[in-house]
Image: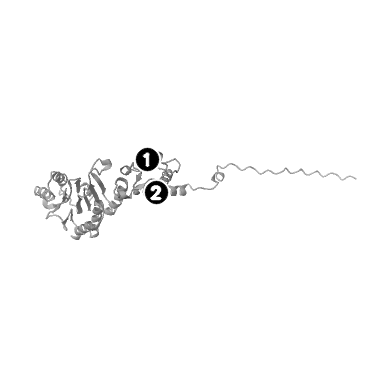
Amino acid sequence: MPLPRFGTFSIVAADPATGEWGVAVQSRFISVGAVVPWAASRVGAVATQALANVRYGPDGIEMLRRGLGADAVVEKLTRADPKREQRQLGVVDAKGRAAAFTGKECFDWAGHVVGEGYTCQGNILVSRAVVEGMARTFESTPGDLPERLLAALAGGQKEGGDRRGMQSAALLVVREKGGYDEGSDRWVDIRVDDHPTPIEELKRVFKLYDLTLLSREDPKALVPLTGDVARSVQQELQMLGFYTGRLTATWDDATSKAFAKFLGENNFENKARDDGMAWPSVLHHLDERARAESARRTTTAPIVTNALSRGPGAAPKPEATSPPKSEPKPKGRRSK
């Protein structure tokens, strides 16, 4: 029984200046992120699709690691593959050089566009406009590599995308020590395995991932934790139960420990600092959490004036006292 082919469009790209390589992909296929994208920091990136040869991923990365350029990797992988005409492949090497291959037996429309530092490829597409739209969007979008890759996916879908529809999407971007606690190079590694609008869902997931794990903000935007900012943070931490001290507007040891606990419990370890500064995104999130908690309390436990004297547990009111009534004098006989 032949393996199913899945219509897919992807972009493989690099930004050697920042040391980032990545792949973004969408397909009418379940869990496309488990098959198509491969990348390694300071090495390169690979997308294998159509009748995907999953060995193209690790084998291609190993060839790039040995110093082969993108063209040589594509040629070497496909030449040794008897099913190469059913394969599609995109590669960007350590120097940002790109190359691609589309087999003659890939289902229409199938093809690729190679540009400076990137390659866009797709099969079972509405038309060539899909990969052209991806390339055009990638080149014209400002920002860093993750933003440009996501924009390129949206640009391809805007031109029609996979002619069978949408199902899954993925984004993989690597940079040296970019992973959690600097333990890997997987700087961004997110997937949407099954969704009616996977690209939009991928964008939503990326926003949460970015807020929690990444530090993509400009260091010039760091906020000093002093004065009114320190007081506001103390008040918000107090609202959320992390801080029990006074509102001193001073970033003392107790406030610092309370803030560190908030960061840890909310998975902001990658954004923790020890220089008395904070990322604007973290302060914004803290403010949102505190406002939400304040609203919750107002809704579920409103403050009622004199509540203790009005509920069922209120102390009984003392009975009013009044002077005793005098007994009426009995009527007697009138004296003669």
Q: Residues within 10 Å of mark 1 (few under 14, many from 20)?
A: some
Which residue occupies the foreground of this view, 318 or 283?
A: 283
Which residue occupies the foreground of this view, 174 or 295?
A: 174
Which residue occupies the foreground of this view, 167 or 150?
A: 150
Horizontal side of residue 322 vs 201, given as left or right: right
Q: Position of residue 240 (x, y in %)?
A: 42, 44
Residue 28 in sight in this render: no
Residue at figure coordinates x 38%, y 42% from the top left: 259
Vertical relation: 164 (above or below) 34 = below
Total marks in image: 2
Q: Secondary structure at mark 2?
A: helix
Amino acid bearing label 1: Lys
Label 1: which residue? 261
How far apart marks 1 and 2 lie (CA) works out to 16 Å
Horizontal side of residue 138 vs 299, given as left or right: left
Amino acid bearing label 2: Asp
Q: Position of residue 216 (x, y in %)?
A: 29, 49
Residue 179 in sight in this render: yes
Q: Position of residue 300 (x, y in %)?
A: 46, 47
Horizontal side of residue 224 vs 106, given as left or right: right
Label 2: which residue? 287
